[in-house]
Image (cartoon, rainbow, N blue to C red):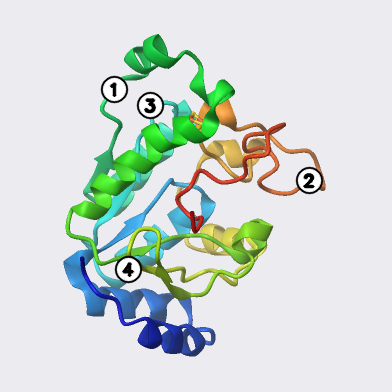
């Protein structure tokens, strides 16, 4: 198992607070080269980061988790982003199709969403990480949810034994959208229909005015995260 210098990452975490997303991304790419990848679900934050990354260095690794339950609009933005930025997307999918999965478990996203995410997201993520990754870049922001409030711009991800870069951790949603408009970045059209946070179709609903941006994820359930960005 690779060893991470936790003291060094903690020191960088403090130093990076004042750095721009581009400076942090450049550092990650310089230090980890082909052993760092951007984890993208193609939400607003992620498409903004893809724009930044490809302007810094074309050909950077980007991966996504294809659960089989994504919205058609998500497939559409993936296509448009791939065309515009010429990225070679690494796609990780579960070992079963949705039909096989539902034959075995039924609608597991209703009866046991944690298990559904474990099979259709975390297991493929583990394979993505096993493919020679020492570090990953994410688009998570502190104000997305209480569970993300303490996110550092670089931190040790103990769950997956990776260095984790969160270059826009301190951005608010408005800043993301200003970036998207200014740079003409393609985005998921569901964002125009009150979907601030977009995951799998069965587990994502539009939110009402004033609601938490992630209120539409697993609405009516205690679950708030799929397990990619939690410590356990
Ligand atoms: S978000 Fe919903 S459908 Fe997607 S993997 Fe998790 S529980 Fe299953």
Q: Which comes sooner in the sequence, label 2 or label 1?
A: 1
**Residue that appears at 38% across and 42% down:** 122
Mark 1 near mark 4, Cβ–Cβ under 8 Å? no
- Counting labels gives 4
Res 184 seen here: no
Q: Distance between the residues labelled 2 and 1?
A: 35 Å
Side of 90 relative to 74 (left or right): left
Q: Where is residue 9 drawn, in percent x and y?
A: 39, 82
- Packing grade of label 3 (10 A; few <14, some 14-19, many >=20) is some
The CA span between labels 3 and 2 is 28 Å
On residue 68, which mark appears?
A: 3
SS at mark 3? Answer: loop
Residue under pointer 4: 55
- Check disc 1 and report the residue beneath it: 96
Instruction: Verify CB contact (< 8 Å) between mark 3 and mark 2.
Output: no
Extreme residue toward the top, this view? 103
User: Residue 61, how many percent across, how many down?
Assistant: 24, 58
Residues at circles 4 and 3 in contact by the CB criterion of under 8 Å: no
Sequence-wise, the earlier of marks 3 and 2 is 3
């Amino acid at each position: 198992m690779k060893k991470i210098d936790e003291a060094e990452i903690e020191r960088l975490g403090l130093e990076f607070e004042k750095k721009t997303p581009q400076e942090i991304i450049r550092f990650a790419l310089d230090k980890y080269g082909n052993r760092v990848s951007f984890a993208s679900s193609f939400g607003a934050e992620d498409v903004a980061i893809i724009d930044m990354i490809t302007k810094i260095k074309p050909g950077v690794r980007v991966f996504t988790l294809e659960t089989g339950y994504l919205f058609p609009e998500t497939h559409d933005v993936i296509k448009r982003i791939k065309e515009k930025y010429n990225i070679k997307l690494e796609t990780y999918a579960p070992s079963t199709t949705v039909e096989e999965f539902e034959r075995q478990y039924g609608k597991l996203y209703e009866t046991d969403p944690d298990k559904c995410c474990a099979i259709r997201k975390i297991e493929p993520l583990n394979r993505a990480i096993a493919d020679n990754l020492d570090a990953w870049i994410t688009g998570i922001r502190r104000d997305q949810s209480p569970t993300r409030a303490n996110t550092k711009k670089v931190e040790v991800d103990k769950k997956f034994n990776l260095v984790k870069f969160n270059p826009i951790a301190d951005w608010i949603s408005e800043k993301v959208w200003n970036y998207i408009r200014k740079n003409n970045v393609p985005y998921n059209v569901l964002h125009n229909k009150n979907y601030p946070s977009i995951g799998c179709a069965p587990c994502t609903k539009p939110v009402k005015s004033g609601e938490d941006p992630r209120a539409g994820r697993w609405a009516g359930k205690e679950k708030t995260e799929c397990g990619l960005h939690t410590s356990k």
